[in-house]
Amino acid sequence: MKSIEELLSQGLSRRDGLKLSGLALGGLALGRTAGAMCDPPTEPCYPTALDTQRYTYFENLETMDFTKDPLPAVEPNEMRITFMGSCIPPVRRAQAMMSVFVEVGGGNGKAADQFVFDCGSGVCANYGAMGVGFARMDKVFLNHLHGDHMADLTHIYCFGPSGDRKSPLYVWGQGPSDVPTPRPPYQYYDDGVRAFCEHLREACRWHTESFSFQTTSYRNYRRPTRQSWGLPCDPVPVGDDPSDDAYAMIPIELNWRKVGGVAYHNQATGVKITHFPVIHCRKGALGFKLEWNGLSMIYTSDTKPEYHTINQAINGGKGVDVLIHEMVVPAEVWAMQNMHLDAPGKGPLWDKTVQALTAVQDSSHTPQGAFGYLLSQINPRPRLTVATHFPVSDATVACALESVRKHCPDITEVGPQLTWSFDLMVIRVFAGDPKPEILQRRANVLDFGFSPVVRPTPYPAKAPKYHTADGSADPYAQIDLSTAILAGDTTYCRSGY
């Protein structure tokens, strides 16, 4: 349990420190009846003196320096989890939408394998700041097809070939939901990831053609096979792109009904990723479990509280190392934040706002009290549980922690058992017997930095689609120069200066 002095060092007032410390001692005496769980909230939910414009816990984490090469090495026994985005819509400047980047060690400080889980709007800026080039973002797992989980796939797809990804983009996701329209004549939409990729590929046609004076593939590329990656289907691109081209988009459609279905099992790197259904807004949403070298991580993404997650986290009695599960603030707190209120409001607008947000919660999400109940049902507990998809601040986290410990009185603080994610939070998990401590770190990056340098491919490049007679890039092939002002002695320097 934190002392009052330690609580104060985290940015809490003395009054709040006394209250939270008292709650820690009194947690064991909290009633476990339904009535006690649903009592109206008190401080620190509202009114609160806690800061709504900072997340002190994250600010106080030990840092890792990603401002220069070489970047911090991935240890051979390390699974590194980095939050490139961590929030729920509507957008806020402090946090991008959801994305979790997972790397596993392979020697020489480099990752042997890496994966992007979700890629919501705004996350590519964080990938760039962390020094992650597009070549390391070629395996994307989408938990569902909401915009805040896939919007930056457009950026990854379109600009990857201009960077260092000269090979296809692989996208895992759900098969069709098979949900009919609500009234006759009933219609079943093809709303799975293959149809999504087909339409996205065509929507980006002007971009991909216009950039195809650049190299988009290289010779001797060894295409992965269904067997080498342990895929549930053959890796076949949508559209008419060559299967070794960087503009080839290859969907891996998953049967979302399966519990424990294998999405990826690479014998060379030892990574196995399985999936299971979760409950979010429409049939088809998925949770993923990654296992490697005796370590395990679950990322549920968005979901209502449900039993598959509990069973997956119990993991046959072995437990998991890291559980990443969504959490939302209660509809009342959500409405207060949206309407810039310090306490619950009154009147028709307030009532309608709370009603609308409650409907969203009921269809899609796990409020903080339900998160606490779900965690209480997992035995053994995850070594570290991370609440994500959450609008963090000192105020919202303190309120959420109070709800969690009503169900889990042994969790008394934000710390080694339970934390709330924030953009550029790095979780370092290590294999061993016994397993070393899980480390939480804050990445130090350049806010005004540029994207990672484009590194040469290991093999000779193929000629670009639009090229000159000698196979060189032809940047003029698709443009009309009749009105262009060309570089010259009397105009401007071609060097750009």
Image (cartoon, rainbow, N blue to C red):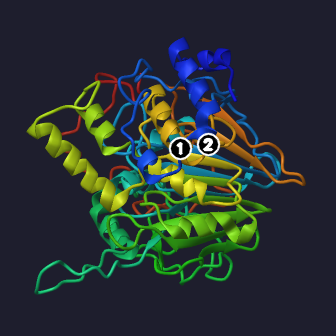
Name the one closer to the observer, 75 or 181: 181
| Secondary structure type for disc 1 | helix
Circle 2 Cα neighbour tier, 10 Å, few/some/many (<14 / 14–19 / ≥20) = many
Q: Residue at x 38, y 25 (%)?
A: 493
Where residue 140 sits: x, y (%)?
Answer: 51, 61
Quadrant in the rendering for residue 353: top left
Q: Which mark is residue 409?
A: 2
Residue type marked 2: Pro
Name the one closer to the observer, 27 or 223: 27
Whether residues under marks 2 and 1 lie with C-beta atoms below 8 angstroms apart, the answer is yes
Q: Residue at x 84, y 51 (%)?
A: 435
Q: Which residue is mark 1?
A: 406
Name the one closer to the observer, 9 or 148: 9
Q: Residue at x 62, y 23 (%)?
A: 60
Relative side of 297 to 233, left or right: right
Relative side of 163 to 456, left or right: left
Between marks 2 and 1, how big is the CA–CA gap? 6 Å
Q: Can residue 226 be seen by looking at this rendering? A: yes
Q: Can residue 455 be seen by looking at this rendering? A: no
Where residue 129 sits: x, y (%)?
Answer: 54, 35
